[in-house]
Image (spheres, coloured by chain):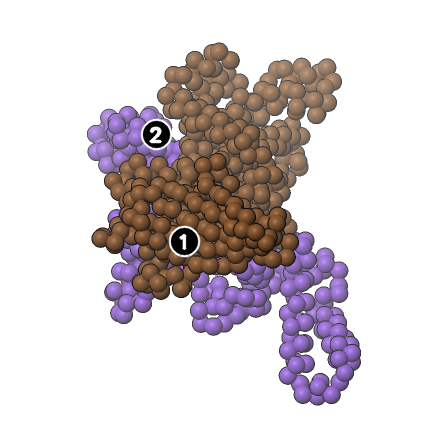
Chain colours: A brown, B purple
Amino acid sequence: MKNLWTQIKSYPSAVAGLAMILLLVVLAVYAVVTIPYDQAVALWKGGDNVWLETPRNARPAWFNFFYREKKPVTIVRRTTDEDATKTNIDLGGGVILSDMVLEFDFNYDDFPTELAIFFTSKYQAARPNVTVNWVTPDGREIPLGEMTIRASESFRVSQDSRLVRRLGGRNPEVGLFADPDNPSKPLKGTYRLVVEGLMFEEDSDVDASLVVYGQLHGLAGTDHLRRDIMVALLWGAPVALAFGLVAAVGSSIATMTLAAASVWFGGWVDWLIRRINEIVMILPLLPILIMVGLFYSRSIWVVLGVVILLGIFGSSILTYRSMFLQVKQSGYIEAARAYGAGSGRIIFRYMIPKILPVLIPGFVTQVPSFVFLEATLSVLGLGDPVLPTWGKLLHDAQNNGALFNGHFYWVLEPAILLVIAGFGFAMLGFALDRIFNPRLRGL
Amino acid sequence: MLNIGTTQAAPAAARSRIRDSVSRVFKYTAVRGITLLVTVVIAVYLTILIANGGGYVDEMRKGQIREQVALEMSSNPEMALLTIQQRRELENSLVESRIKRAGLDRPFFVRSFEYLWDGLTLNLGRAEYLVSDSGSRQVRNILGERLAPTLLLMASGQLLLFFSGMSIALFLSRRYGSLLDRIVIALAPTSTAPAWFYGIFLILIFAGLLGWLPFSGMIDAPPPQGFLPRTLSILKHMILPVGALIVSSIFPMAYSWRTFFLIYSSEDYVEMAKAKGLSDRQIERRYVLRPTLPTIVTSFALTLITLWVGAIVLETVFAWPGIGRLTQQAINMFDTPVIVATTVIYAYLLALTLFLLDIIYSLVDPRVKLGGGGTRS
């Protein structure tokens, strides 16, 4: 073992490959620990109220580091926050006036993408009434509107056509922020949203939250459904590793057993296995997988089973076969036969362990092809229905014209992780091949 | 050398030898052809089994019958006289009798062979949702329209791959151990990613950032008039997908072929040729390239298998209007007849490519060509 490590260290590409694999393992463990499976599935499914406060198609926040003109990130202010000012005044006769002020600093050089206010309220029968005013840093006051609200109400300021008309045809997220002297730039400073709530019951209450959607979000950005891409990037790691490793180990061991049996029994078994191999090798694998995915189940585990089943045959069975042919002639096999060992015992205890070293580089180099197979199926729209994976990110990006619309981050992030997974295993496998194979010459 | 000697000595013997080798080539290709045909039959049968395991083929046929009956009844004015109850009974009995007539009540084992024949002849009736550009809903017409672009893309990609791989490998074997050689070895792991993956990067660089080449598609919209502008437009659209195909397999291919060349150029007869004073080019052509070709053709066949599989997604990524994109569209629309048909056509295309390579193999492999040594393998 120690010997192996010193040998690996002498190949720089193997060390780099190992580092890449280690990075993925760390990522995978982090993902599974911080976002449990159920939560990841729920987050990726989205639905109402999951991704309410994230912008659509936002680039990663660290892009600001490279921009001379800083793009806004999302700002969220709630009246339930500690620093928010909210005063309820009892006007008598069951009428309560609630004064709420949401304050935020806006120091960016570009406009936000959207503006929304979400209200929550408590009442028995009489619905509260709210008046919303926008106060710019230079003191201008712009009324946004007045409305009667239900228990949960969202006011998409950006989609208010009357407000657009009042702002002179400009979208609210531009009009409300524009500098009066230089309308193409936003005015920097402290903005205030003043909400005045009128409640007509004793126990009534109103809360508001303001979301100024930015152009940038989080470490990885968001997709067309406002989902944080980071969730899929993180969860893609354990899925890819599990799929690739299980498929590679499963099909390698099955292939090896079959090759050993083919050699040991010889005769018609050997003939049959070789003929089946010839046929399966040129079966159109992907179309068959597509049909299985389409007609039976898209679950990644069903696909994994079929992949292993079809992966048993292939050119590697011939390689293993030629090795086993040599092993079969060795003296110790003769000895095993002499003491009366059964076929199963000889295959599993004597033949397979002898060539196991060659399995290791072989299966390490096979891992990435399975990782990419999962991505390929996902890109075709046959990814796992619930799990977020890298391939599904690419699929969404592809379907929404990410490259055409310039959302490069959406494609590049999963692609780079796929490259790391692919090259990590491939580089390690190539080096292991060179380390292990000289030993095989002593067969 | 043996060959040359006998031709000069005895023309009659040479003629019989040629006849012999022609018959051997023929026999070899015939055996391979039959094997490949059996594979196609098995692949199609498997397709039918998988598709019908969920009852989809039966469902597809029954659905078509039901649709037809409903259509006929709704266009028949006499039906308006019947009550809803009577109409429903009539419809059910009509559907049942037609199902019987189509043989759908027979056991699946019997029917599966019928489906197999339909599949092999691509007689798959009408698509459920997809329509060909000319407006036909016959699966065969839809496929026919998409076949040419796929063949154009894959054939040019594969040919270019073969010849560029060959010349790079030869070049590297001459400069064994040079910087370029080591770069190609270092890039060998690139084969782990499929062609479509490199396609995304190529689109990003050459279409997104630089804007030199189109993002996707096969021809400009609207298509230019005249033969030359049209060809140029198609060529322009082909650069990126063909480039992706080549990038995905050229490095490991050049690496392994260069290794074959190196192995064969250390043989004794090459040393002998060098001693005789033959030029490098002559040695390469006669003593290195010639014995390596069979190995190269075999390894190229394995590369092609992966290339064909990857074609589906490659066409999807590049919106290339071929069979692969058709497959993806059929998946999105859940168009069963088209999906079954594309699987069948991929089995055919793969088998055909390998068959062509087998013919080439039998032509370049002296063991297949020359008499007595044929059984040596």
Judge from the rendering whether residue A112 lies leftward or rightward of residue A367; answer left or right.
left
Question: Is residue B112 visible from the viewing direction of this image?
Answer: yes
Q: Say left or right for A77 vs A284.
A: left
Residue B35 lies, with reference to residue A265, above or below; the image says below
The residue that mark 2 highlights is B186
Q: Which mark is residue A301?
A: none
Q: Position of residue B186 (x, y in %)?
A: 34, 29
Q: Quadrant of residue A427?
A: top left
Residue A11, given in percent of the width and then of the height, sits at 38, 20
Q: Which residue is depicted at the point 74% across and 88% down? A: B81
| Chain where mark 2 sits | B
Q: Check the image and report above or below for A181 versus B370.
A: below
Location of residue B85 in the rendering, given as x and y in whole percent from the top left corner: 78, 78
Q: Is residue B75 above or below residue A324?
A: below
Of residues A217 and A434, the one nearer the viewer is A217
Residue that extends furthest to the front in the rendered view of this protein: A92
Name the foreground residue: B101 vs A302.
A302
| Residue at the disc numbered 1 | A133
Secondary structure of residue under mark 1? strand
Percent x, y for residue A100?
46, 46
Q: Residue at x 59, y 18 (%)?
A: A330
> Are there few (<14), some (14-19), or many (20+) residues within 10 Å of tag 1?
some
Type of amino acid at the residue the image marks with label 1: Asn
Label 2: element kind: helix
Circle 2 packing at 10 Å, graded few (<14), some (14-19), many (20+), is: some
Residue A299 vs A94, above or below: the answer is: above
Query: In whole angstroms, how far apart are the C-alphas of marks 2 and 1?
Result: 63 Å
Q: Is residue A285 visible?
A: no
In front: mark 2 or mark 1?
1
Quadrant, the N terminus of chain B: top left
Mark 2 and 1 residues: CB-CB less than 8 Å, in contact? no
Tell me which residue sits at (64%, 83%) in the image. B75
